[in-house]
Image: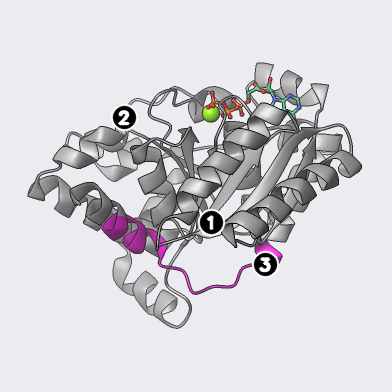
Amino acid sequence: MHDQASRLRKMFDSEKTKTEKENYNSASRVIAVASGKGGVGKTNVSVNLGVSLQKMDKEVLLLDADMGMANVDVLIGVTPRYNLGHVLEDKCDIEDALITGPEGLTILPGSSGIDEFINMNIYKIKQLLKLASHLEENYDIIIIDVGAGAHQGVVNFIKAADEVIVVLTPEPTAIMDAYSLIKILSKNEVRPKLNLIVNQVDNDREGDEVSKRISSVIKDYLDLEISITSYIPYDNTLREAVKKQKPIVNLYPRSRAGKAFTKSAGQLIDRDVGNNAGMQGFVNKVLGFFKS
Ligand SMILES: Nc1ncnc2c1ncn2[C@@H]1O[C@H](COP(=O)(O)OP(=O)(O)OP(=O)(O)O)[C@@H](O)[C@H]1O
Ligand SMILES: [Mg+2]
C-alpha cells in the first residue's frame, strides 16, 4: 500500500484526490521541528514521530530542511540522489526526489541553502507552488526538520508552519537557547502553535520540572502558552538504533524512548485542532518573509 508507485499514482491522480479532499480538510498539517541548541535530538524526533504517525495511518512527508547538516537520510540508511533543489531547477521530477522510508514515510531531502529562497526567480516560485499543491493533496502531515539555531532563515521556516515542536534537553544551555528561540518567535505577529519535546530526560519527573520552568517563564514574560509537551527519556538503545540506521520505534519499539515517541505521536493526533494553513500557506508565507 505504501510503495512508491502507488503513492505516485495517487499524487498525479489529482482530480479524484481533489474531490475526496474537498469533502474534508484539504490542508496538510505542517509541523516544524526546531531547537535553539544543536545536537539535542531534532532529527531523531522528526524521523521517529514521522514513522509512528505513519503507523497510525497518517500519510507523512518529512522535509529535511536542515541545510547545514541534512541527515535524515543517514538516520534511515539511504543515499538520496536528488533533492528539493533539483526539483525546483527542473533537473528531475518530484517522484525522483521522494524517498520511501520505513513504514512508507516519505522523505524529501532539502537543497543546499535556505538562502536560495532569497534569490528565487519567478520560474522557481511557480515550481515551488506547484509542488506545494501536490504535497498538500497527498500528505496529512508534513514534518520539517529545520535545523538548529535562530537565524533568519530558520525563523522564517518556523513562522510559516502551522505548528512548531521546540526540542530541548534538561541542560541549562539547551533550556536557555530554547527560550531565546521562542522569544524571537513571540515577537512575530504570525505565530505557529507551540509544542515542546524535552528529550534525554532521566525520568518523567525531570521532564515535568524542565517543562514547568520553561512554560512559566514563557507565560510570564512572553504571554505564550504551550499546547503539547512530551518527554523522551535518555536511552542507550536510541544510540544503537542510530548506529544501525534504523528508527528506534521500529528497531526497539518496547524501549523506553521507543514507547515515548509512540506516545508523543498519539498526543499530536489527539490534539489536532485542524484549521491549518497547510503546505500552500507555508510556501506563500516563506516567499513573503524572504521578500520583505
Ligand atoms: N533520547 C536520547 N537518548 C540517547 N541519546 C540521544 C537521545 N536523543 C538524541 N541522542 C543522541 O544525540 C545525537 C544527536 O541527535 P540528533 O541528530 O537527532 O540531533 P539534532 O538536534 O538533529 O542535531 P543537529 O542540530 O546537529 O541537527 C544522536 O545521534 C544520539 O546519539
Ligand atoms: Mg539534525
The extreme top residue here reads 243
Question: What residue lies at 81% left-to-right and 21% top-to-bottom?
Answer: 236
Residue 281 within the magenta-colored segment of the rendering:
yes
Q: Which residues are magenta?
A: 269-285
Q: Amino acid at mark 2?
A: Tyr
Depth check, front residue: 267 or 151: 151
Question: What residue lies at 64% left-to-right and 45% top-to-bottom?
Answer: 49
**Mark 2 touches mark 1? (CB < 8 Å):** no
Q: Position of residue 97 (x, y in %)?
A: 34, 37
Quickly name the residue at label 3: 271
Q: Is residue 46 visible?
A: no
Depth check, front residue: 61 or 13: 61
Quickly name the residue at label 2: 82
Q: Is residue 286 visible?
A: yes
Q: Is residue 212 above or below residue 21?
A: above
Quickly name the residue at label 1: 59
Q: Earlier in the sequence, mark 2 or mark 3?
A: 2
